[in-house]
């Protein structure tokens, strides 16, 4: 019996994402039982649109967490980039700048914000938790300065792209596929190895010749990039600017990363799981609303479900041990 | 390949106010093995780390073929052809063996890592130790599944994979068993032919005499012997260089066998099973030092941890004739059992807390609910004096102590508690000769107080010198019990190696 559990534990360690896939399928089944038209193309398309911003933000967060850090400011970066983009469109949606330039500048702004985080954490050696919490106020404050209240319009081109199809697959799916491809390439590059090494054991990584500060800084820049991409997506779908849009997004992105099997302590995880984690979060929301949970209970039920899921692996370990003791 | 000579000249390094190295010198030419010796805290790790770029010296020169090398990180040192096996290992548990070995010099195809090549090259490297490591180890095994000996081997292969001109082996044999050490030494002979310069650090003098061509000795941060050919030096002289004239290790008094038969049984173990344990039965007398011998990882540590209630097990354990079942260490401690772990850094000490707190941790309750601090401090002072602790003050953090002194704290904290049974899990790993000796004295003192000691060591000599009886482990079972004249190196080694050998031995008798 001992051997069997040991085997199970090893299997669990090696194929940690199996738990996520199981949850993902379970969520789909429950969702389908409550919402009969779940598999209709238009419903799925809508679903992909709700997943996309969460997945983008969580993908960036995953890089940071795998590298051994944490980013509490990514929601604020979303607000900032959203406001920068809308501001550059001249609030009315008419500007001399081309749409692409505006988007590019927005993305650069996000990466700059990430760079600030990266320098604080990797080179000034501030605690990631404290540094990014503090910088989140900086970015949120900047967003409010740029755009004091929700306002503005964006060119219709952006919305057209957002609703568009290419080869019969709609825009959000394309973005997710692209993100995954980039992740797989990065993962099998030398940067990928040094990322996992840095998160796994920074000291050993340093002794092995990994440029630890640079890698850790890069993760924050990448997080900034993905936060900006999230902001672009949000701007495309809302078509307006809101300085508080990102406020509630940060914790969700962290939950998505953890649900996806990435270790909070770093060194293990990936973007595939993170995207599944984001999808699971959205599905739980849908399930709660389709199950006719009274509005004032929804937040509570959501909390309980997420808590149970996150505790799942630990509880199963406890049960295994109980079982072992009895033998 | 042409000859390359690496040297360090008059290297000085301060850490804060402490001078770790005041005059470090060493010279290693390609094709030779130079042993760097010294007691713990003599600065040999610091000197080696200066050569690998981990530590940046305050002054002094690092030379390659008489030309200065400038570097400030392991990456720079790597570019000069210097690779090191680090004492504390530089492996990342959640990565595979292959990923660890080739980290930052992976075989690539374009910008991507060539997975197949990575796997094959790693398999070739692992083949070097074929037969001495478990056959189930593959290049894509995760490092956290490996035992400490296998991790050590991966670390060695990782350094070798860099094709270095200078290879530094810092305590590379500390976790290896005899067979693995033999294999490593035959590999080193080959590497010498490949014109690799090798710096060898070990606490085991017999290894130094086996493999080194020259020795350099550090004492208190100063070079006291420089590149002396090994053939020109005797073991005793070497020890004298290391510890100075004053405190040479004494011959240990042997415990009389008659007394053992009189003493009553302190702990009786019957049919102990669990992880790595396949039915262990043994009785230990009061005041006895029982050695647990055998190759590394045959269940010795697991037996100690089981008795301590730290891991799950089945079987009967009786203490003073009373059946006990411990499911956690607290229960064991309440019954007067103490445990000294081998990995003092992660298991035995709270290194940022003060020496006082560490010494007092098991015995605070003796001083009342509101702690009578004065009495506690007095007792701690008494203990630290009797331990010969070299320290700034009781309120200094344990991290300020050298390895040997820190280990004395780990053992010493049980003195106040006078445990009935003391379990030691390879306590002298990486501890220098002087501190070891003091540790032995400590054990003798505990025994005088009636403490029963179960002692596992990876060093055979230590078991032979210290123990009244040795049980030899093999694959989770007791392979042989050595008493009296059988306590000698030949019997211990041959009974450690395999179960068949014993059969042969018994027949011969």
Image: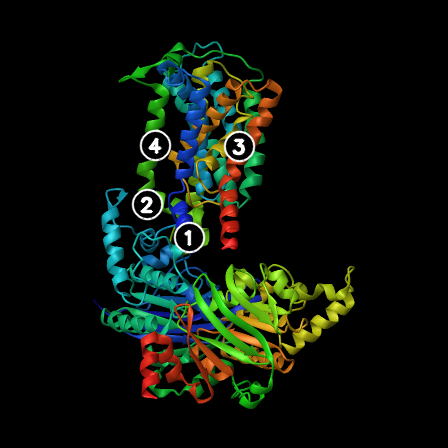
Q: Residues within 10 Å of mark 3 (few under 14, many from 20)?
A: some
Q: Between marks 1 and 2, how big is the CA–CA gap?
A: 32 Å
Pick whichever of labels 2 and 3 is earlier in the sequence. 2
Which residue matches tag 4? A180
State the separation of the CA atoms marked 1 and 4: 32 Å
CB atoms of marks 1 and 2 within 8 Å: no
Q: In this rendering, which labeled residue sits more in front, label 2 or label 3?
A: 3
Nearest to N terminus: mark 1 or mark 4 = 1
**Circle 1 is placed at which residue position?**
A6
Q: Distance from label 3 to label 4 (Cα)? A: 25 Å
Point out the frontmost of discs 1 and 4. Answer: 1
- Judge depth for marks 2 and 4 and give the one in front: 4
Judged from the image, the secondary structure of the residue bearing numbered disc 1 is helix
Q: Say what secondary structure mark 3 lies in.
A: helix
**Residue B127 is drawn in which quadrant?**
bottom left
Q: Nearer the viewer, mark 1 or mark 2?
A: 1
Nearer to me, A24 or A179: A24
Badge 2 crowding class, 10 Å Cα cut-off, few under 14, some 14 to 19, many 20 or more, is some
The numbered mark at residue B278 is none
Q: Chain of mark 1?
A: A
Asked whether residue B341 appears in the rendered view, the answer is: no
Q: Which residue position is annotated with label 3?
A: A306
Q: Which residue is mark 2?
A: A190
Residue B422: x, y in percent? 58, 72
The chain ID associated with circle 4 is A
> Can residue B23 be seen in the rendering of this structure?
yes
Give the distance between the C-alpha atoms of the residues marked 2 and 4, in whole angstroms.
Answer: 17 Å
Question: Mark 4: few, some, or many residues within 10 Å (few <14, many ≥20)?
Answer: some
Precedes in sequence: disc 1 or disc 2: 1
């Amino acid at each position: 019996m001992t051997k069997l559990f040991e085997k199970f534990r090893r299997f669990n360690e090696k194929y940690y994402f199996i738990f996520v896939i199981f949850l993902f399928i379970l969520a789909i089944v429950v969702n389908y039982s409550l919402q009969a038209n779940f598999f209709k193309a238009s419903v799925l398309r809508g679903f992909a649109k709700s997943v996309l911003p969460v997945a983008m933000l969580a993908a960036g967060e995953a890089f940071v967490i795998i590298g051994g850090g944490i980013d509490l400011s990514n929601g604020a970066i979303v607000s900032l980039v959203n406001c920068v983009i809308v501001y550059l469109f001249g609030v009315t949606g008419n500007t001399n700048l081309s749409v692409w330039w505006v988007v590019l500048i927005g993305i650069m702004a996000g990466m700059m914000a990430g760079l600030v985080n990266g320098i604080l954490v990797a080179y000034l050696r501030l605690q990631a938790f404290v540094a990014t919490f503090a910088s989140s106020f900086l970015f949120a404050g900047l967003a409010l300065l740029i755009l004091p209240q929700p306002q503005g319009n964006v060119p219709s081109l952006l919305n057209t792209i957002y609703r568009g199809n290419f080869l019969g697959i709609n825009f959000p799916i394309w973005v997710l596929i692209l993100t995954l491809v980039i992740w797989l390439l990065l993962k099998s590059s030398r940067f990928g190895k040094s990322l996992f090494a840095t998160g796994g054991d920074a000291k050993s990584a340093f002794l092995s010749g990994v440029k630890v500060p640079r890698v850790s800084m890069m993760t924050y820049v990448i997080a900034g990039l993905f936060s900006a991409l999230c902001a672009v997506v949000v701007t495309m779908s809302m078509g307006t600017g809101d300085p508080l849009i990102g406020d509630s997004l940060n914790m969700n992105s962290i939950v998505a990363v953890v649900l996806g099997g990435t270790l909070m302590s770093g060194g293990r995880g990936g973007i595939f799981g993170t995207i599944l984690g984001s999808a699971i979060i959205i599905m739980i929301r849908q399930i709660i609303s389709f199950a006719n949970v009274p509005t004032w209970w929804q937040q509570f039920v959501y909390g309980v479900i997420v808590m149970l899921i996150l505790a799942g692996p630990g509880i199963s370990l406890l049960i295994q041990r109980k079982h072992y003791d009895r033998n | 390949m042409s000859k390359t000579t690496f040297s360090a000249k008059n290297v000085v390094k301060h850490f804060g106010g402490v001078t770790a190295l005041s005059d470090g010198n060493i010279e290693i030419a390609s094709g030779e093995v130079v042993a760097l010796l010294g007691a713990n805290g003599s600065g040999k790790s610091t000197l080696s780390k200066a050569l690998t770029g981990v530590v940046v010296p305050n002054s002094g020169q690092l030379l390659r073929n008489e030309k200065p090398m400038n570097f400030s990180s392991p990456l720079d040192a790597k570019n000069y052809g210097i690779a090191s096996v680090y004492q504390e290992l530089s492996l990342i548990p959640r990565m595979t063996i292959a990923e660890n070995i080739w980290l930052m010099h992976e075989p690539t195809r374009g910008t991507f890592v060539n997975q197949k090549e990575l796997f094959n090259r790693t398999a070739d490297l692992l083949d070097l130790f074929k037969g001495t490591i478990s056959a189930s180890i593959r290049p894509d095994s995760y490092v956290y599944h490996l035992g400490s000996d296998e991790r050590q081997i991966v670390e060695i292969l990782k350094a070798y994979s860099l094709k270095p001109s200078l290879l530094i082996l810092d305590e590379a044999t500390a976790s290896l068993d005899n067979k693995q050490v033999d294999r490593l030494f035959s590999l080193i002979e080959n590497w010498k032919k490949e014109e690799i310069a090798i710096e060898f650090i070990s606490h085991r003098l017999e290894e130094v005499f086996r493999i080194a061509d020259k020795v350099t000795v550090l004492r208190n941060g100063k070079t006291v012997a420089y590149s002396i050919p090994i053939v020109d030096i005797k073991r005793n002289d070497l020890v004298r260089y290391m510890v100075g004239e004053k405190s040479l290790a004494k011959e240990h008094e042997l415990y009389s066998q008659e007394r053992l038969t009189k003493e009553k049984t302190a702990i009786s173990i019957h049919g102990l099973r669990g992880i790595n344990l396949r039915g262990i039965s043994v009785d230990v007398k009061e005041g006895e030092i029982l050695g647990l011998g055998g190759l590394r990882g045959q269940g010795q540590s697991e037996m100690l941890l089981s008795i301590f209630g730290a891991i799950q097990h089945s079987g009967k354990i009786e203490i003073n004739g009373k059946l006990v079942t411990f499911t956690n260490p607290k229960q064991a401690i309440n019954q007067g059992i103490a445990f000294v772990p081998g990995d003092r850094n992660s298991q035995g000490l709270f290194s940022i807390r003060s020496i006082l707190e560490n010494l007092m941790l098991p015995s605070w309750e003796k001083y009342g609910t509101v702690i009578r601090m004065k009495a506690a401090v007095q007792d701690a002072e008494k203990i630290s004096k009797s331990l010969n602790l070299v320290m700034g003050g009781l309120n200094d953090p344990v991290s300020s102590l050298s390895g040997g002194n820190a280990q004395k704290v780990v053992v010493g904290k049980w003195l106040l508690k006078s445990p009935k049974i003391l379990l030691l899990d390879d306590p002298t790993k990486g501890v220098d000769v002087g501190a070891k000796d003091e540790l032995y004295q400590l054990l003798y003192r505990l025994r005088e107080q009636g403490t029963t000691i179960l002692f596992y060591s990876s060093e055979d000599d230590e078991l032979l010198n210290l123990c009244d009886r040795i049980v030899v482990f093999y694959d989770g079972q007791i392979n042989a019990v050595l008493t009296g004249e059988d306590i000698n190196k030949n019997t211990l080694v041959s009974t450690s190696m395999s179960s068949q050998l014993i059969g042969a031995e018994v027949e011969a008798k």
